[in-house]
Image (spheres, rainbow, N blue to C red):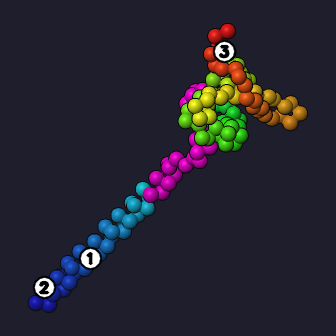
Amino acid sequence: MIRLSVVSFLLISMIFLGCGKDKEIKEKNEKVMQQDMEENDTVSLTPAESFGAVLTQSILNDETEVELESFLSETVYPKVSASSNVTIDKISSSLYILKYYEGTAEKYILIQKYYNPKEDSITFEMTETTLTTAKQFLK
């Protein structure tokens, strides 16, 4: 009878210990999965950063224009953020034309890219223009 009690006790103890280990393993797996998700999670972009990224990467199809992307995000976005549609065309290696809408009126901005050899930096200048993409490309 004592043996039966000891065997029962040991059996019950092993079951409880086994369940505890399964729970520990499950918790460890969940932590590892969560860490992997955090490491692989894409960084959330602000609307301005998304604006610059979409125009340079999706529309211009140029992922190397980091300076232009930054300029669009910081300088151009505040001016055109209320527009319903915005697009950009590359006229030359240093000249871009951006089209946006202000209400129902089409507006255009020329963006000129400059290199400053003294400071070894790239800068941009933007000017509003009456030049349209059709006028520029269909001369």
Single out the residue that lies furthest toward the left. 1
**Viewer-side label of 1, 3:** 3
Report the quarter where the N terminus lies: bottom left
- Please state the horizontal and vertical placement of residue 64, each as a whole percent of the image: 65, 31
**Residue placed at 59% from the left, 35% from the top?**
103
Q: Which SS type dominates the magenta stretch?
A: helix
- Please state the horizontal and vertical placement of residue 126, each as a whole percent of the image: 75, 31
Start and end of the magenta stretch?
34-62
Q: Amino acid at mark 3?
A: Lys
Which residue is under mark 1? 16
Q: Quadrant of residue 52?
A: top right
Give me the C-alpha separation between circle 1 and circle 3: 80 Å
**Residue placed at 38% from the left, 65% from the top?**
27
Residue 72 appears in view = yes
Give me the C-alpha separation between circle 3 and circle 2: 97 Å
Helix, strand or loop status at disc 2: helix
95 to 17, vertically: above or below:
above
Dot 1 crowding, Cα within 10 Å, few <14, some 14–19, many 20+:
few
Single out the residue that lies furthest toward the bottom. 2
Which residue is under mark 2? 4
Which residue is under mark 3? 135
Q: Nearer the viewer, residue 28 or 137?
A: 137
Closer to the chain start, of discs 1 and 2, is: 2
Closer to the chain start, of discs 3 and 2, is: 2
Q: Amino acid at mark 1?
A: Phe
Single out the residue that lies furthest toward the top. 139
**Residue placed at 13% from the left, 85% from the top?**
4
Residue 49 appears in view = no
Closer to the chain start, of discs 1 and 3, is: 1
